[in-house]
Amino acid sequence: MLTTTVTDTGQITLPDEIRQHLKLVSGSRVEFVIDEDGQVKIFPLTVAVETLSGILHRPGIQPASLEDMETAISEGANDWA
């Protein structure tokens, strides 16, 4: 297991093995995602968005159609009105 220390300003240094695995170089951008189990995942932003499809999949949950998503958004907006 690889570890690092958080500085007073909230910064960390990613271990070299992690940087190599993610193909990160100086100036690379990364994204952090907290999944449904509370696990934090890090993704290099140099990958195509399509490769991130399904990363938050929950077994037993059916994918929502675009129409379902639009309905949910509309209903949510009405709750704020």
Image: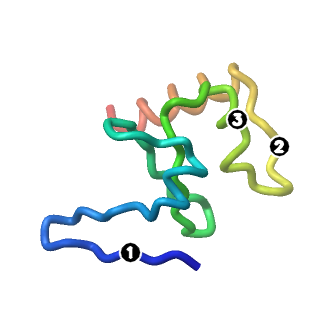
Q: Nearer the viewer, residue 29 or 65?
A: 29
Q: Nearer the viewer, mark 1 or mark 2?
A: 1
3D distance between C-alphas at marks 1 and 3: 29 Å
- Dot 2 or dot 3: first in sequence order is 3
Residue at the far right: name it. Answer: 60
Quadrant containing the C terminus in the rendered view = top left
> Which residue in the structure is indicated by mark 1?
4
Q: Is residue 52 left or right of residue 33?
A: right
Assign a secondary structure to mark 1.
loop
Way the structure is coloured? rainbow
Q: Is residue 24 above or below residue 66?
A: below
Q: Give the residue type that dot 1 points to.
A: Thr
Residue 8 place in picture, x, y as percent: 13, 73
Judged by depth in the image, the label closer to the viewer, 1 or 3, is: 1
Classify mark 2: helix, strand or loop: loop
**In the image, is 43 to the left or to the right of 50?**
left
Q: What residue is disc 3 on? A: 53
The dot on residue 81 is none
Give the amino acid type for the residue marked by disc 3 in the picture. Answer: Ser
Q: 47 or 58, which is in the foreground?
A: 47
Question: Which residue: 52% across, 75% down?
Answer: 2
Q: Is 56 rendered above or below residue 29?
A: below
Label 1: few (<14), some or many (≥20) within 10 Å?
A: few
For mark 3, does the 10 Å Cα neighbourhood hold few (<14), some (14 to 19), or many (20 or more) residues? few
Residue that appears at 45% across and 51% down: 32
How far from the left and from the top, in percent, is residue 30?
A: 43, 43
